[in-house]
Amino acid sequence: MTRSGPIALSCGEPAGIGPEIAVKAWEALRDSCPFFWIGDPRHLPENTPFKEISSPAEAPAASAAGFPVLPLAFRGSSAKGTADPANAAGVIQSIETAVKLVQAGEASAVCTAPIHKKALIDGAGFAYPGHTEFLAALAGRSRVVMMLASEQLRVVPATIHIALADVPGTLTPDILRETIEITAAGLRDQFGIAAPRISVAGLNPHAGEGGAMGREELDWINGLIRGMQDEGLSVTGPHPADTMFHAAARARYDAAVCMYHDQALIPIKTLDFDRGVNVTLGLPFIRTSPDHGTAFDIAGTGQANPSSLIEALKLAQAMAAST
């Protein structure tokens, strides 16, 4: 069933590039991808022709007259380049509002602008490592996975923000199985791929080379993948990661499950740095985000590239149409 309604875009860190790229995305997409921004209009670039709305349903019509804003009053500064912890409660409320609206069926998806975690911790005692964990808590989900997606490649890291030395001990059969299963379900349910094909990277160089470069592949990764194949899942591997990402290899799968952060993110950022999109799979709603940070150093200068946010909004729209 297709999800209806405009996309809810949370404001992210007001002192960063989020407000600027949101307006640029509206200028690019106003006629083709309806969305609305949840935040304080004081944080928008000067002379932005915004239009306040009171409900998501008003956003498509409002977009013809100005940038649609569901207003929230923030307590902190509107200055660019340095996060004000006094804005933390407003940033969190923006995310919570977006989630409530999509859960209520008033919005089709959530798209999130980049946050600054230290400001949220300092200003509001934010108890989560980042957006993804907070969204999982709001949705009541204990396990979600991060996908980075572009037109050329989709990748999912099974472990994320941990030291490389900790990966072999953190990665377990249960974690890898859950990551593959959530990825397959997300490809089916949110990307409209009826029979998703998943390729799994090895943990070690050359996928262990028969135990000469590590034994995890022999000890349990091979067996896990064979077992999932027997269950009917179209999954292959473990493959040497250095031969998984050329064009011919990418044509053989819909998503690559990788064992650690850089193994997944280096290929997609090399292939499509400006247009990669962060997607959270395993939530009961669609969530996308640009794949970059707050960029305080250029905030307010007009230099920010909106490409990743534009792609995040377009992907959210396509996923909503497939759901």
Image: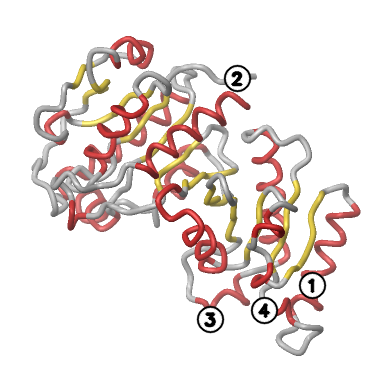
Name which of mark 3 and mark 4 comes first in the sequence. Answer: 3
Q: Secondary structure at mark 4?
A: loop
Marks 2/3: CA–CA distance = 43 Å
In the image, what residue occupies the spot 71% across and 85% down? Answer: 214
Where is residue 221? Give x, y as percent. Answer: 77, 69
The mark closer to the camera, 1 or 4, is: 4
- In the picture of the structure, the residue carrying the numbered disc 1 is 220
Is label 1 in a helix, a strand or a loop? helix
Residue extending farthest front: 248
Q: CA distance from mark 3 to mark 4?
A: 12 Å
- Report which residue position mark 4 lands on: 204
Q: Earlier in the sequence, mark 3 or mark 1?
A: 3
Q: Which residue is mark 2?
A: 2
Determine whether, in the image, residue 75 is placed left or right of residue 241. left
The crowd level at tag 2 (other Cα within 10 Å; few <14, some 14-19, many 20+) is few
Which residue appears farthest toward the right when viewing the image? 230
Give the number of the disc on residue 165: 3
Amino acid type of disc 4?
A: Asn
Q: CA distance from mark 3 to mark 1?
A: 19 Å
